[in-house]
Image (cartoon, rainbow, N blue to C red):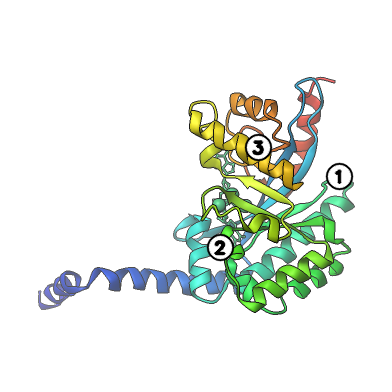
Amino acid sequence: AAKSQGCQLWEIYQPEMGQVSQERAKMERELRKALAEGVLQLHFQPQVFSHASHAPAQLYGVEALSRWHHPEWGWVAPPRFIAVAEDAGLIHQLTTWLINAACAQLAAWRTQGLRIPHIAVNLSTNNFHDPAFALHVQATLHQHGLGCQDLMLEITESVMLDSSPATLDNLKALNEMGIRLSMDDFGTGYSSLSYLHRLPISELKLDKSFVQDVCTSAAASALTRSVLNIAQSLGMTVVAEGVETLAQAQWLSEQGCPILQGYHFAKPMPGREIAQWMQKQAITQPA
Ligand code: C2E
Ligand code: MG
Ligand code: MG
Ligand code: MG
């Protein structure tokens, strides 16, 4: 009885912050273990050129997305474990694994004869604080027999607003190597357009919060048209993310959005399923 009472008291007086940080600490330990054991996986989501309805679908690239299946918790949402990795100083290790695994998969697809133009990976702001980051990326590409055009690095606006010397040096080095940068979730961040012409961005990813409203909201469709105009005048390409319906895909195509990505085309899938998905696409596309 004394013991259970003690337990109750412990529960009552445990401050909420303490519980949160205990959960964090546990997730950090488990993530560290998962990285050491190599149990993280990648799923891949196709990105297709928007096209006239009579033309066959053409693949622009694929985005690699990290997946963690924990034996007790099941699938852990990427934004959760990515945040833990960032706080715990594990993001360098995670990104090293990510880029290596993505390059290995692209090389394997090409060996199978699959024509995948490039692979995109998501980066954290912290990755740019490693002075050797750009060199690591280049070395990994070389190791897998790939070139600089084979990898697209997705960054967020916070990288652009970070003026630390390491970040600026890495951005400059990547640009000189010819490794392309994509601005993910465009429109949700600080929305400061001024960095767009100062820094070498090749691609804007229109955030899914706009894409999902383009057919129903005048504001979302006006913003989308503006982003398409800005990108065109700056020589950048645009990927609409989170395209879920045929109506959204058609509206975006009509507005001249060059590339589409979302559940309407395919959900992220294991690497071995990509070949089958590509075959099926070709078959279901009228000639
Ligand atoms: P993101 O890079 O913007 O990726 C798009 C997210 O939207 C992915 O969620 C994807 O599965 C989901 N998505 C794709 N199509 C649709 C759609 O049609 N509708 C809806 N509702 N969602 C769609 P996911 O895989 O859960 O990843 C969430 C975020 O976590 C990513 O957003 C990215 O910021 C981050 N993330 C994922 N993997 C990594 C990684 O390896 N490294 C880093 N640093 N971040 C990662
Ligand atoms: Mg992304
Ligand atoms: Mg995004
Ligand atoms: Mg995102």
Say what amino acid the circle numbered 3 marks.
Ala
Image depth: mark 2 or mark 3 in front: 2
- Is label 1 in a helix, a strand or a loop? loop
Q: CA gap, disc 2 to disc 1? A: 33 Å
The residue to which callout 1 is attached is: 115
At x 54% / y 77%, what residue is drawn?
89
Give residue 62's position: percent from left, percent from top. Answer: 73, 47
Residue 93 seen in the figure = no
Residue contact between numbered discs 2 and 3, judged by CB atoms under 8 Å: no
Say what amino acid the circle numbered 1 marks.
Arg
At x 87% / y 61%, what residue is drawn?
147
At x 74% / y 52%, what residue is drawn?
202
The residue to which callout 3 is attached is: 266
The residue to which callout 2 is attached is: 158
Say what amino acid the circle numbered 2 marks.
Ser
- Is label 2 in a helix, a strand or a loop? helix
Q: Residues within 10 Å of mark 1 (few under 14, many from 20)?
A: some
Q: Is residue 197 above or below residue 177?
A: above
The earlier-in-sequence mark between 2 and 1 is: 1
Q: Nearer the viewer, residue 219 or 9?
A: 219
- Quadrant location of the N terminus? bottom left
Q: Is residue 73 left or right of residue 247?
A: left
Give residue 72's position: percent from left, percent from top. Answer: 45, 60
Residue contact between numbered discs 1 and 3, judged by CB atoms under 8 Å: no
Ligand 1 within 8 Å, label 2 CB: no
Q: Is residue 36 above or below residue 241?
A: below
Q: Is residue 192 left or right of residue 97?
A: left
Give residue 105's position: percent from left, percent from top. Answer: 77, 56
- Quadrant location of the C terminus? top right
At x 64% / y 46%, what residue is drawn?
205
